[in-house]
Image (cartoon, rainbow, N blue to C red):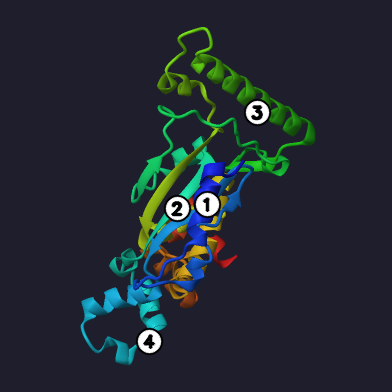
Amino acid sequence: MPLTPEQEAEIAALRDAPRPTLRPVADGMEKHLHLVHPVLDHGFVRVVDYMGDDSSIVQAARVSYGRGTKSVQNDEGLIRYLMRHWHSTPFEMCEIKLHVKLPVFVARQWIRHRTASVNEYSARYSILDREFYIPAREALAAQSAVNNQGRGDVLGDDEAARVLDWLREDATQTYDHYEAMISQEGQQGLARELARMNLPMNVYTQWYWKTNLHNLFNFIRLRADSHAQYEIRVYADAIAGIVRDWVPFAWTAFEDFRMGGVSLSAKAVEVLRRRLAGEVVTQETSGMSKGEWREFEAVWS
């Protein structure tokens, strides 16, 4: 179940009782507010609250630059300038609070983004639901031969079936033992804060995650990338769809300069200059390592 009955009732009450406000309102975000965006088999992302919009970014920048900026540069152009020149503070004027349901192993990867306020569901006080992430058949792949932290070829049918059976059986058994340990029927029962250590990494947890737009863009840039792990990438993709509607000018600039742009080292720039001058440059004469050269060449292929 993506949401509990209590959560569904809370969301219904919030959406049925809109209130007028004098703060900036983003029409694109309003349609997402409190709505559940399903992710994976039992997970979701939903917007609990937000602050600011494209105009908030512009307003903050013009305070820094002083009067008169608006007369020479439109809002979209200014936002593109800020993004192009890595001005971060104006984008920090926008904030978002998300309610996310996700597997524990995804949460442990996600929490490495330390520029957010997080409050997670506590298994010390509450009992986690019997919900586990079981990958789809096509998401099962072998270890990559060239990337120590990535996937390679998809598993064959027999191997995939065996892995899926193990995942289901192990998750079910560990949860059965978890329930038995905390049970107080005819016995004392183990404390929940201890019993939780037996739960598998694919059990679902939930948290509220609040961050500003600048740091959210950093999260999306890393986690919506094709090289990111699939299970966190689908969450980043869902959030990206929300941000696209929330701050369309900022999103377009971010997509252009960060997601679609390329950052070159001084050595890479020098290689381009030499090539434009007609020189044949190889990895051996470039001053780059093999890894740097491979990534550099991939940009132009």
Query: Which amino acid, by three-letter code, is at mark 3?
Result: Leu
Q: Secondary structure at mark 4?
A: loop
Specify which label sits upstream in the sequence, 2 or 1: 1
Q: Which residue is mark 3?
A: 167
Q: Which residue is mark 1?
A: 45
Count residues near mark 3 (Cα–Cα under 10 Å), then give few for <14, some for 14-19, many for 20+. some
Q: Please say if 113 is above or below 85.
A: above
Specify which label sits upstream in the sequence, 2 or 4: 4
Specify which label sits upstream in the sequence, 1 or 3: 1
Q: Are marks 1 and 3 in contact (CB under 8 Å)?
A: no
Q: Please say if 174 is above or below 216.
A: above
Query: What x and y, as percent, mark residue 145?
Result: 60, 39
**Separation of disc 4 and disc 3 at Cα?**
54 Å
Specify which label sits upstream in the sequence, 4 or 3: 4
Q: Quadrant of the N terminus?
A: top right
**Separation of disc 2 and disc 4 at Cα?**
31 Å
Count residues near mark 4 (Cα–Cα under 10 Å), then give few for <14, some for 14-19, many for 20+. few
Residue drawn at the location 57% of the way across and 43% of the way down? 5
Label annotation for residue 98: 2
Residue drawn at the location 51% of the way across and 53% of the way down? 11
Residue closest to the eye, 123 or 231: 123
Specify which label sits upstream in the sequence, 3 or 2: 2
